[in-house]
Image: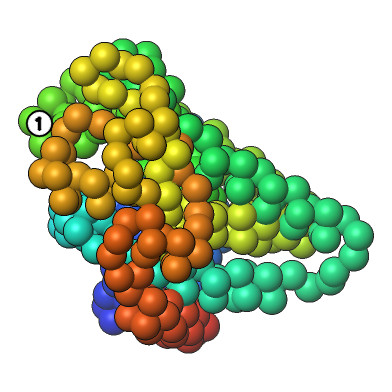
Amino acid sequence: MQRQLKDYLIISLKGMAMGAADAVPGVSGGTIAFISGIYEELISTISNVNLSLFKTLRTDGFSAFWKQLNGNFLMALLTGIIVSFVSFMRVAKYLLEHHPVLIWSFFFGLIIASIYFVGKQINRWDLGTTVSLVIGAVLAFYITTLPSLNNNGSPWFLFFAGAIAICAMILPGISGSFILVILGAYKTLSDAFHDFDFKKIALFAGGAVIGLLSFSHLLKWLFKNYHNTTLAVLTGFIFGSLNKVWPWKLTDTVIDKETGNIIPFSDVSNLGTLSIFEKQSQITDAYKTVSESSTIPSVYSEMNQIDSHLIPAIALMVFGFLTIFILEKIGNKKS
């Protein structure tokens, strides 16, 4: 069916939701794409970028090239992603620094709903799909427990980080921004965008393009040949990522930026969480979180000597949960 202008506006709105999700380390834009009903079209469109596409451009002209590329879809989606990502990144940074429990509560509810909506698309459950779900969940959980590396601005490293992070960004449940944090490239890239360091941005983008084109072919093949198993693994990824977005966290170890040494956070403060310590002490650039662990609200409140914000957190979880219902309803509308 031929898409109308309103259909492309809806695709742009879905792109904006993806961009907002990708701006937060721990939340996957791929999850939003899946829930909103554009995931497989996105993967198929990206994987169709090959040499034959440019042969079409040379022999049949731009119009045929644009149609084969599915250019209107990509343009609408990328516009939404870029506008949202650039604008929401600063908002997300502020919320993560000043209201971490509340923003993580919203995304926790969103991901809980995502597990249901992605999982229900599995047509048949058997031993293979169950094992695949468990493997995906364990792998994603393990990734959320990995300590962050120190910042690295090496050119080849940025290229590699771009290739790895973009693969994570299109996988439901795995956050590309969080992978950048783990690799130690998140701050380097953020600074590059802030300082308009086009060399570093180009290196990262080059790696992202190579990674995206390569990985999309693999995903397309997996969906075509192992649809149920692939969905089970992706559902597991989303389930395992819950550990990262759990709102109440205690900091285990930090890196002293002056010495480069990794030390227990208990050696720095009697409080339980680095962000709370920074807010109360106004010491904001001396330490960086290396590892953290989830805890219950009452322990979080006791360790940090603050309110756990349990009631508003639950309300935001419900709101995040309902947001997925809205996205899924939009995604089910026939174009």
Q: Which amino acid does label 1 sit on?
A: Phe
- The spot of residue 281 in percent (x, y) is 14, 44
At a point 69% along the width and 76% down the height, the residue shown is 120
- The spot of residue 328 in percent (x, y) is 49, 80
Is residue 32 placed above or below 285 in the rendered structure?
Answer: below
Residue labelled with disc 1: 196
Q: Is residue 269 visible?
A: yes
At a point 45% along the width and 39% down the height, the residue shown is 252
At a point 37% along the width and 35% down the height, the residue shown is 265
257 vs 334, nearest the viewer: 257
Q: In this view, does 292 lie to the left or right of 100?
A: right
Q: Which residue lies furthest to the right in this view?
A: 127
- The spot of residue 140 in percent (x, y) is 60, 47
Q: Considering the image in quadrants, where does the C terminus appear?
A: bottom left
Is residue 170 placed above or below 235 in the rendered structure?
Answer: above
At a point 26% along the width and 14% down the height, the residue shown is 259
265 vs 204, nearest the viewer: 265
Looking at the rendered structure, the secondary structure element under dot 1 is loop
Q: In which quarter of the image is residue 75?
A: bottom left
